[in-house]
Amino acid sequence: MITSEQCRAARALLNWTQADLAERVSISPVSIRAFEKGGEMRGSNRKLIRLTLEQAGITFIAENGGGAGVRLANPKNMK
């Protein structure tokens, strides 16, 4: 499941605002803002956010002792 920190980092890598993500996921920017501040979000919406970010080129890195993270899947091919 995506964390609020991963969401913020992924948006930064894509140069997306909260409004950009909200539009792509079809949920309110207020919900994105609240989630990124540590608020709760339905699992289905978190899954949708993750899928949207993955389709945009984000790879999620599992917590492996160093903490969960994100990276661009193939930065050379990103616009």
Image (cartoon, helix red, strand yellow):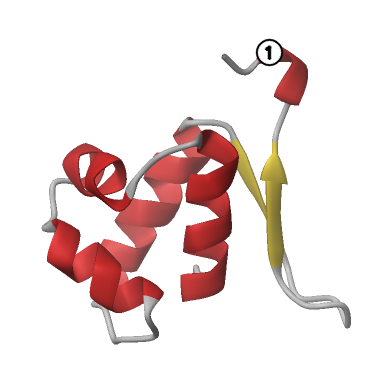
- Give the residue displayed 40% in from the left and 39% down from the top: 16
- Residue 70 vertical placement versus 38 (above, below): above
Up-down relation of residue 69 to residue 54 (above or below): below
**Left or right: residue 1 compared with residue 23:** right
Picture coordinates of residue 78 (x, y %)? Answer: 62, 18
Disc 1: CA contacts within 10 A as few (<14), some (14-19) or many (>=20): few
**What residue do we see at 71% from left, 71% from top?**
68
Which corner quadrant holds the C terminus?
top right
Residue 22 to residue 1: above or below: above
* Residue that numbered label 1 is attached to: 77
Residue at image x 30%, y 45%? Answer: 21
Q: Is residue 3 visible?
A: no
Residue found 24% across the figure and 77% down from its top: 42
Q: Secondary structure at mark 1?
A: helix
| Residue 75: percent from left, percent from top | 73, 25
**Looking at the picture, how far across and down is residue 69, in whole percent?**
70, 63
From the viewer's perspective, tell me whether residue 5 is left or right of residue 42. Answer: right
Can see residue 59? yes
Residues 8 and 70: in front is: 8
Instruction: Give how far across and how far down residue 5 sits, in percent.
Output: 55, 71
65 with respect to 46 (left or right): right
* Relative to 70, 34 lies left or right: left
Say what amino acid the circle numbered 1 marks: Asn
- Camera-side residue: 16 or 70? 16
Number of residue marks = 1
Q: Give whichever of 12, 24 is nearer the camera.
A: 12
| Residue situated in front as seen by the camera: 48 or 18 | 18
